[in-house]
Image (tube, rainbow, N blue to C red):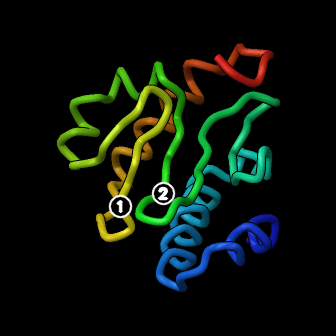
Amino acid sequence: MTIFEDYLATLEKSEQREKMATLLTWIAQHYPDLTPVIKWKQPMFIEHGTYIIGLSASKHHFSLSPEAKTIRLFEDEIKAADYETTINTIKIKWTQPLDYELFKKMIDYNRTDKKEMTQFWR
């Protein structure tokens, strides 16, 4: 995805670039109606101007950010996947497998929950 190429180039390790690119591509392919954007130097997907999900990279993990409400709702499944959480993010170690079914549930929930929303954040 060309919109994310510059962002991916900032990741030092090729394994990290590959994992992040794989997830970004998966989201784009499974949700072609979402608009990929870079905001606050992070890749995100929005729908009708509303935030749906975003990612950011760190040295030992990357963060998936579906917003606090969604994290609370899927807390048990997130823990079952062995991911750590903060109030607004899910921390996924670079060595951990990607739980696409969980990601799908969270994205689907956000799209449904925010379909009438006119602001960027909840």
Circle 1 sits on which residue? 93
Q: Residue at x 59, y 53 (%)?
A: 56
Mark 2 vs mark 1, CA separation in Å: 6 Å
Q: Is residue 116 left or right of residue 74?
A: right
Q: Residues within 10 Å of mark 2 (few under 14, many from 20)?
A: some
Tell me the quarter of the image containing the N terminus.
bottom right
Q: Secondary structure at mark 1?
A: strand
Q: Is residue 9 left or right of residue 53?
A: right
Q: Is residue 76 above or below residue 32?
A: above
Q: Is residue 91 above or below residue 111?
A: below
Three-letter code for the amino acid on which mark 1 is drawn: Lys
Q: Residue at x 79, y 45 (%)?
A: 39
Tell me the quarter of the image containing the C terminus.
top right
Task: Examine the image and state in which quarter residue 97 appears.
Answer: bottom left
Q: Residues within 10 Å of mark 1 (few under 14, many from 20)?
A: some
Circle 2 sits on which residue? 62
Q: Residue at x 60, y 62 (%)?
A: 24
Q: How many marks?
A: 2
Q: Is residue 43 above or below residue 17?
A: above
Three-letter code for the amino acid on which mark 2 is drawn: Phe
* Residue 88 percent coordinates (x, y): 50, 30
* Residue 63 percent coordinates (x, y): 49, 49
* Residue 47 percent coordinates (x, y): 74, 35
Q: Residue at x 69, y 32 (%)?
A: 51
Q: Name the N-terminal-most of marks 2 and 1.
A: 2
* Residue 58 percent coordinates (x, y): 52, 60
Task: Examine the image and state in which quarter residue 96 appears.
Answer: bottom left
